Amino acid sequence: MTPKVGNIAIDCNDLEAMTAFWGTLLDLKTTSRSDDWIDLEPLGEGGPVLSFQKVPESKSGKNRLHFDLDVPDIHAAGERARELGATPAGAPMGDDPDSPFQVWRDPEGNEFCFVTA
């Protein structure tokens, strides 16, 4: 039997701030909540649910897993993310000047990339 990914869970300290950031950035609505867990809509049709779990400890170190978000313009996507509370982790980069990518950090420091689609 092959397992199916049902949820991608992100540990966080502030459930409301993180679900507001990611829900707005990805245009996903909240589907369920409890005191220490919030689910957003699935990532695409039939995709896993994006979930957030409240934990007491803060993030430390680099993520071992991150999202690559396909966008037509990394600069416009970055400005929108900045308005929502993200910060750039560095300048745009990549071997192909027509297909740059840029690493960003969400409000709790979790890295993600905008990648030219």
Image (cartoon, rainbow, N blue to C red):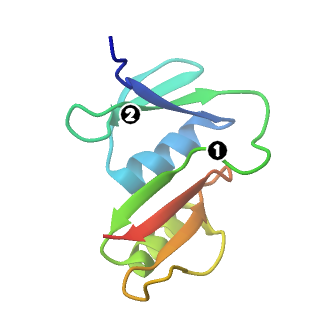
Q: Amino acid at mark 1?
A: Arg
Residue tagged 1: 64
- Nearer to me, 24 or 112: 112
**CB contact under 8 Å: marks 2 and 1:** no
The residue labelled by disc 2 is 40
**On the picture, is 43 further left or further right than 87?**
left
Q: Can you say which quadrant of the picture contains the C terminus? A: bottom left
Q: Residue furthest top?
A: 1
Quarter residue 45 falls in: top left
Mark nearest the camera among 2 and 1 is 1
| Crowd tier of the residue under label 1, counting other residues whose Cα lies within 10 Å: few below 14, some 14–19, many 20 or above | few
Farthest-out residue, front: 1
Residue extending farthest to the left is: 45
Q: Quadrant of residue 10?
A: top right
Element carrying mark 1: loop
Q: Residue at x 54, y 49 (%)?
A: 66
The N terminus: image quadrant: top left
Tell me the element at label 2.
Answer: strand
Q: Depth check: give the residue in front, 66 or 84.
A: 66
Q: Position of residue 76 (x, y in %)?
A: 40, 78
The alpha-carbon separation of the residues under discs 2 and 1 comes to: 22 Å
